[in-house]
């Protein structure tokens, strides 16, 4: 897997139901959209019509929530077949899912649960990612999840685990900056150390989102604006990783589309500022990609 | 490796889905290591191991409760918040989600309600859930080319009898015992719903231009539309419809029903018609 295999899409937002009509009727300027794959795994009707219409006008990326790549269950071949068929029809720029497990024993928790960070689990997960990539005939991206528990048996830091899986599976990384921040608070590690340890050539996409402060822990709710600390981490990531497509996620208390546009624009401005600083600092502008025209 | 991972994931699954919370789940747990949950999950001064699993347990239940409230908004309104909450608690024990998409999580709710104690107080509610589920299934059912009225009218009348007809996949015919379409319509229109009457009736649910609609239909129409699960000749459909109609009104009524079906987009365009519509290759 090479990062150059993936296009730089710019600054996008997650496509959510309250904005379908606005997007279809007004065709607002937006670099790209990310869609939740499972929401479109249906036989027909409105969901697929909407996706086809959006795809006609914008680049899309398919982001899954039920691959369950870390489960002890066998991979779900029916799910993979549907994913492959969907990718064939809608030609996403790439496909991503989470480094987690979502169910076991044939049952689905519809949540993203963390794994024990051990060498054995690295091998288990990376082997399965390779199977998925062979089946889909393309490299996929795996995303770090927000988590609220860690396992006693873990022997690797989360960033070491993520890096090891990505390298052994030869896949890309979808680096969720908010998830890094949330998990850093919940497990008392350094978010900056995490960002600095991720291999540059594997990061293909960022997620930016809001969370809820529950006092004892942060909850990854995607129902608030991106907080200043996460923006600062994002700027750090841009300085380290260069031109990486960024996406705003907002899944609850979803605001007007214009708010999402403003948030994506802020990500663009931070990118421009950070890339400018990087180029000025190291005398290199090789990481600067041309941005998609609106 | 996998057996060990499976045992950890299975333990967490049991605790997260325990009906009375992680605490009671732990008390009933026989598969815990000697050191208890703290020997599996790391706790700290902010949150114990159990607190941390509790976060996942709450997210599991409330996420699915929200999905059910959205999918079964009328059922939820009829039952009230507490009843619906308790119903879903029991439902998830009986029918835990198994599919990758959360949209299938509630597909057995009507079946679950039929034998549920709430059906004594609300005897129509299983029928209401059946109708709500049908609207979801029809919403995302397979697409099919629809026979339009203009196309049917372009076929010479003498050939109508032989035209093959089939119902589109995005449609369903429900047999229910209560007039629940009135309840669903009242809730959708934000009107006060009233107890429906107990009358056996049939409801047609269908999708036209992405919009799902429903209406009560008579037994003759239901029988004919059900028969259209398989391709039938138009003459055969007319015979079925005419069975329950007086001779002097049959032709008019059949004509009205056919016009209605075409307007509703209920009839598929057959492959033979599609072939006829293709331009002739240049000779």
Image (cartoon, coloured by chain):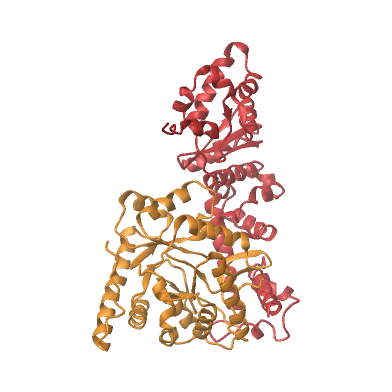
In the rendered image, the vertical position of residue B175 relative to residue B239, given as above or below: below
> Which picture quadrant has residue A121?
bottom right
- Residue B163 lies, in percent from the top left, at 57, 25
Q: Residue at x 70, y 58 (%)?
A: B94
> Which picture quadrant has residue A194?
bottom left
User: In this view of the protein, which residue sits in the foreground, A205 or B205?
Assistant: A205
Left or right: residue A9 compared with residue A129: left
| Number of marks drawn | 0
In the rendered image, the vertical position of residue A203 relative to residue A74, given as above or below: below
Give the position of the C terminus of chain B as an image quadrant.
Answer: top left
Left or right: residue A135 compared with residue A238: right
Q: Residue furthest front?
A: B283
Q: Residue furthest right?
A: B30
Is residue A111 in view?
no
User: In this view of the protein, which residue sits in the foreground, B158 or A18?
Assistant: B158
Is residue A141 in view?
yes
- Residue A125 lies, in percent from the top left, at 59, 76
User: In this view of the protein, which residue sits in the foreground, A187 or A285?
Assistant: A285
Chain drawn orange in the picture? A
- Residue A154 lies, in percent from the top left, at 59, 86
- Figure colour of chain B: red
User: In this view of the protein, which residue sits in the foreground, A254 or B50?
Assistant: A254
Give the position of the N terminus of chain B as an image quadrant.
Answer: bottom right
Q: Residue at x 66, y 56 (%)?
A: B91
């Amino acid at each position: 897997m090479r990062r150059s295999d993936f296009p730089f899409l710019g600054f996008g937002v997650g496509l959510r139901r309250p904005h379908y009509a606005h997007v279809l009727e007004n065709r607002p300027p937006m670099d790209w959209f990310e869609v939740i794959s499972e929401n479109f795994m249906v036989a027909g009707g409105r969901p697929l019509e909407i996706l086809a219409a959006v795809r006609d006008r914008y680049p899309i990326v398919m982001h899954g929530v039920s691959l369950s790549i870390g489960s002890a269950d066998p991979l779900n071949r029916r799910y993979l077949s549907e994913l492959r068929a969907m990718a064939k029809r809608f030609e996403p720029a790439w496909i991503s899912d989470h480094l987690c497990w979502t169910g076991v024993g044939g049952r689905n928790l519809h949540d993203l649960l963390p794994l024990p960070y051990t060498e054995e689990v690295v091998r288990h997960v990376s082997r399965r990612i390779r199977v998925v990539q062979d089946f889909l005939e393309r490299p996929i991206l795996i995303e770090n999840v927000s988590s609220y528990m860690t396992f006693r048996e873990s022997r690797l830091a989360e960033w070491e685990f993520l890096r090891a899986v990505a390298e052994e599976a030869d896949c890309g990384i979808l680096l969720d900056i908010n998830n890094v921040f949330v998990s850093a608070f919940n497990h008392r590690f350094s978010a900056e150390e995490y960002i600095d340890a991720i291999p540059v050539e594997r990061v293909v996409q960022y997620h930016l989102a809001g969370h809820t402060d529950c006092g004892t822990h942060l909850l990854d709710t995607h129902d608030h604006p991106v907080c200043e600390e996460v923006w600062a981490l994002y700027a750090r990531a841009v300085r380290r990783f260069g031109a990486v497509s960024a996406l705003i996620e907002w899944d609850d208390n979803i605001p007007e589309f214009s708010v999402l546009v403003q948030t994506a624009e802020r990500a663009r401005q931070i990118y421009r500022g950070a890339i400018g600083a990087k180029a000025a600092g190291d005398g290199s502008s090789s990481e600067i990609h041309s941005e998609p025209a609106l | 490796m996998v057996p060990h991972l499976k045992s950890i994931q299975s333990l967490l699954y049991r605790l997260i889905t325990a009906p009375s919370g992680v605490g009671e789940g732990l008390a009933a747990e026989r598969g815990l290591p000697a050191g208890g949950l703290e020997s599996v999950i790391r706790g700290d001064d902010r949150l114990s191991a159990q607190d941390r699993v509790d976060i996942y347990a709450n997210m599991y239940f409330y996420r699915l409760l929200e999905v059910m409230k959205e999918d079964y908004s009328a059922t939820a309104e009829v039952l009230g918040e507490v009843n619906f909450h308790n119903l879903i608690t029991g439902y998830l024990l009986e029918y835990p989600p198994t599919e990758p998409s959360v949209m299938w999580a509630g597909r057995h709710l009507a079946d679950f309600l039929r034998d549920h104690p709430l059906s004594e107080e609300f005897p129509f509610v299983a029928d209401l859930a059946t109708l709500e589920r049908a609207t979801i299934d029809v919403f995302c059912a397979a697409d099919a080319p629809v026979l339009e009225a203009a196309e049917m009218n372009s076929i010479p009348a003498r050939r109508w009898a032989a035209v093959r007809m089939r119902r589109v996949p995005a449609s369903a015919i429900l047999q229910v015992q209560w007039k629940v379409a009135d309840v669903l319509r009242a809730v959708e229109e934000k009107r006060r719903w009233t107890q429906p009457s107990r009358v056996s009736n049939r409801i047609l649910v269908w999708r036209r231009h992405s919009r799902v609609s429903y209406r009560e239909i008579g037994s003759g129409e239901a029988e004919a539309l059900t028969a259209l699960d398989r391709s039938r000749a138009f003459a055969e459909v007319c015979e079925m419809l005419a069975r329950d109609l007086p001779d002097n009104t049959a032709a008019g009524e059949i004509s009205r029903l056919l016009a209605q079906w075409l307007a509703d987009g209920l009839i598929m365009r057959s492959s033979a018609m599609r072939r006829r519509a293709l331009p002739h290759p240049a000779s």
